[in-house]
Every structure is written in C-alpha cells, then in structure tokens.
Image (cartoon, rainbow, N blue to C red):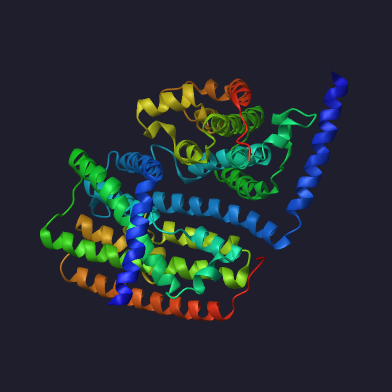
Amino acid sequence: MGTFKMYREFSRISFQRSAAYRFDVWTRIAGNIMFLFMWGFIWYALYLGKETVEGVSFPSMLGYIMISQALQGIHSAGTQLWEIQERVRTGDIAMEMLRPYDYTTRILFSDLGSIFFYILTAVLPLYTVLFLVLKPAVSLTFAQVGLFIISAVLGYLIRFCIEMTFGLFTFWLIETGGVEDVFYFSISLFSGSLVPLWFFPAWLEQVARYLPFQAIFFTPNSIFVGQLTGPGIFIALLNQAAWLLISFLILRLVWHRASAKIVIQGG
Amino acid sequence: MVKSLIRGIVMYLYMVDASIRAQLQYRYAFVMNILGWAMTYAGTAVTMWVLLFSFGALDGWVFWELIFLFALAVLSWGVCMIFFFHFRSLDQYIVNGTFDRFLVRPVHPFFHFMAMKFDVGALGQFLFSIAAVGLAYSNLNLHWTWQWAVFLGAVIGGSLIQGGLLVAISAVAFWTTRSERLYWVIMWPLKNLMNYPLSIYPRLVQLLVVFILPFAFVNYLPALILLEKTGRIFAPFWGALSPLVGGIFFWLCFRFWLLGLDRYKSTGS
C-alpha cells in the first residue's frame, strides 16, 4: 500500500503543476475544439443529401466524432511520444532510473494527475455544453455510460503501453524519425479516431480489427454512440483487456531490455 | 544598390551552403526526416481515401481533386519551409538572449535570421506533393496550357502567405517572448482546415480565410481554376490573384516584424 501512496503523490504533484500552467490547458483545448468543428463540418458535408450510410445516420456520427475528439483531448494531456524520446536522447531518463521507483509506473501516475486536471477544468465542462447544444444521437443509458468509461480507461492504458514502447525504441535507434511516423499514422487511421472502422473498405477493416489501435478509440466511441450493444460490448471489452495484457507484457519486456542496454550520449 | 544586392545574394548563398552542410552531417537523420515528412502526408492522403470510400465525394470534390487541393498546399508549404520554417523557433532565441547576436552584425537582422537555416527537410514535402500533383493530373485527365502560370503563381503566392504568417507569429515574441503556442493555435488548425474544400465551412470562416488570413489563396481558390470547378461563391479568376495577395500579405507581416524588432528589448542574461 505504501508504494501506491508514493505513486499517488506523483499524480497530486502533476495535478498541481497543470493548475499552475493553466494557459497551456486553454490553448490545448482551443486547438482541440477547432479540430472538432473542422471534422463536424467535413462529416456534415459528406452526409449532405444522405440519410444513412452503412446504417449510420449523421446525428450518431456527430456523437462519434465528439466523443472521439474529447477522448483525444484527454489523451493529449499525458506524456507524448516525443517527450519520452527526448528524455532517452538527452539521458535524463538515467537519473530517473537511479531513483527507487518504476519509471513507467511513475509516468503513468504523473499523467493521470494532469489528465484529471484537464478533464475537470476543460474537457468535461466544455463538452457537456457542446453535447447539450449540438444534441448528437447517443445512447446514454446508465449501463452504457458505465461500460463506456471502462472501455475508455482500457483504451487509454493500451495507448499508454504502446506509446511508451515506441518511445523506448529510442534506446536502440538513437534517431527516431521513422518510428514516430509509423506510430502517429497508425494511431490516427487504425484507431478509428477520425474515421470509424465501419466506413473502411472491407479488407482494410479486417486489417484494422486485428491491430491493437482500434481498442484505443474505436471501441469506446462505438459503445458511446450505441453502435455496439448487448453481448457485443462484452466481447469488445474482453478484446480490449487482451490487448492491454499483450501490450503491457511487451512494454515490460522492452523496458527490461532497454534498461539493460542503456547508452548515454553526453553527460 | 546593385552592389549591395549582389553582396546580399552572395552572402545568402554562402550561409545556405553552411546550413546544408550542417544538416548533412547526420546522414541517417537527414534521410529519415525527409521520408518521415513524406510518409506523414501520404498518411493524410490515405485517410482522405478512406473517408471518401463510402461517400464518393465531399461537396462535389472526388478523391483526386481532394488530393490535388491537399498537395498544392503541401507544395507551397515546402517552399515556405525552406526559407521561413525556423521563424517558428524565434522565441527560443529571444528567451535565451541569443537573438542579440543578430543585431550586432552588419546585415539586416531579418535577412540574417532567414538565411540562418535552409531547411532541406522540405524535400519530403516536395517528394509527396510533386508525386501527388502528378498522379492527380493524370487521373483527372487535365491538359494545362496557360494554367501552368496560375499553378506557379499559386505556389509562389502560397509560400508567401504561409511564410508571412510564420513571420508575423514569430514577431509576437518581441512583445511577449513566447510565440510558439500561437503557431499551434492559429496556423496549425488553419493549415489543416484548408486541406478540405472551403465551401463546406460556414460563411464566417470563408470570409476569414479570404480577407484576413488569406489562406484561401494558398490552395482552394487556385484549385477552382485549375480543376475547372465553378465555385458557388467565388468567381474563378480570384485564384489567379495568389501572387499579388501573397506579396501584399507578406509585406504587411514583414512590417509587423520590423515594428516588433523596434520594440525588442533583450532579455539579457
């Protein structure tokens, strides 16, 4: 229990740090909302003159992009891939490794602190207003919302493990341009963050279904807009749990190897 | 006059040479950087393709037209990047107090800062956009004659407009010492917005990008002429005005930068 208290302290500190740098929070949410409106107009234009496409109507698509954009905003409050790469490259990570805690767990708890602040002060109030004003079609039964939250948390943890793993590749690569681009491309397309998988061509949808990225945004989003119902939800949640386990094990393995192979440039 | 112009050009070339050699020192990083940029844009193109797969067209724009619109913006962004991209980090120089060195040398500070980097990473933008424009050109069965002049004008005007905004944003740092955030709040969303046809956005946004921050002249308006699309709002000839608009906008941004420079007080240290 003592260790948990220590990690919780990291969350508290980063919560306070976010509160101190409130300007960052405002600019980040401003950008987020601008992209929400951009995608809103794009989907509106795509749907013009069409009732439903692939069985999905515009109001429910609007719900999809809104929740997707909200989740992306929440994810953006955490440590980004380039920050991890920078810490490896500058050798700052070595100082952290000397300390009596597990580095990846420490980062996770710090991120949870800043994410909590971001949800509380920016995402939740703003998106509540937007949902009330724009009235997208969403299925907000009590159970559905609960399952959505579980799914969103699982999605976040999967993303954390994958992003961290990609970041740790810096230990072997020194220069990471290509790795970064593979990660960002996959997370923007295969996660369903911009275009839901049901609009993909069949073969590409099959590819996306077998990748872990769909578990990050597509699953929680689908639950939220009610495209995923009944037993389908539980299968999807199990799928997420499996991906979380796999990506967590890979992260631990890579972390184990990386700490054995540390190369510090400069000092 | 002519003498100082020649002196300026010679000096610029000398500094460009130094900058390119510096960037070529890390071969692997150099190649990855270029491939990375090209891949990022190809990724956006793939997203557009997926987006249009079930829907066919976006407000009358089919896939290759959309790609052309996007690639035209990337092409002029590439040209702009070569000359002006490092203005984004001008605030770093001001915060660290290293901007002062641009003031004490016998060259104009704007020119000196501009010549400091000749970003060869922009080859990635060219790699993607030239391939994409070429593919769009053949897939749309275009046969340009005089339109090549409009195309060239759009590239020049587009680089001036985007470069102008980069310069103007960097100038804010003369007052506030911080400006990079503005890039992410103003320019980044604006650039993304313009990757899709302007007609899908509300009138207010259209007026903004035509008359205030003239990004419509970067790709949308020229594309209307070049793809022979009849805009419902804008007469096609607007697109031919890109170089003119770019010139004026850049000049205004440059004046704003000079105004900031006058106000500049070193952070010392």
Where is residue B156 shown, x and y percent of the image?
65, 30
Where is residue A137 shown, x and y percent of the image?
18, 48
Quadrant of the rendered image containing residue A59: top left
Quadrant of the rendered image containing residue B237: top right
Residue A206 visible at all: no
In the image, is residue A198 above or below residue A35?
Answer: below
In the image, is residue A63 above or below residue A258?
Answer: above
Residue B101 shown left or right of residue B135 in the figure? right
Residue nearest the observer in this picture, A198 or A125? A125
Residue at 60% from the left image edge and 64% from the top image edge:
A89
User: Which residue is outermost to the front?
Assistant: B269
Placement of the C terminus of chain A among the 4 image quadrants: bottom right
User: Which residue is outermost to the right?
Assistant: B3
Residue at 48% from the left image edge and 30% from the top image edge:
B229
Residue at 73% from the left image edge and 52% from the top image edge:
B23
Placement of the N terminus of chain A among the 4 image quadrants: bottom left
In the image, is residue A134 above or below residue B108?
Answer: below
Residue nearest the observer in this picture, A68 or A176? A176
Residue B56 shown left or right of residue B31 in the figure? left
Where is residue A143 shown, x and y percent of the image?
12, 63
Quadrant of the rendered image containing residue A134: top left
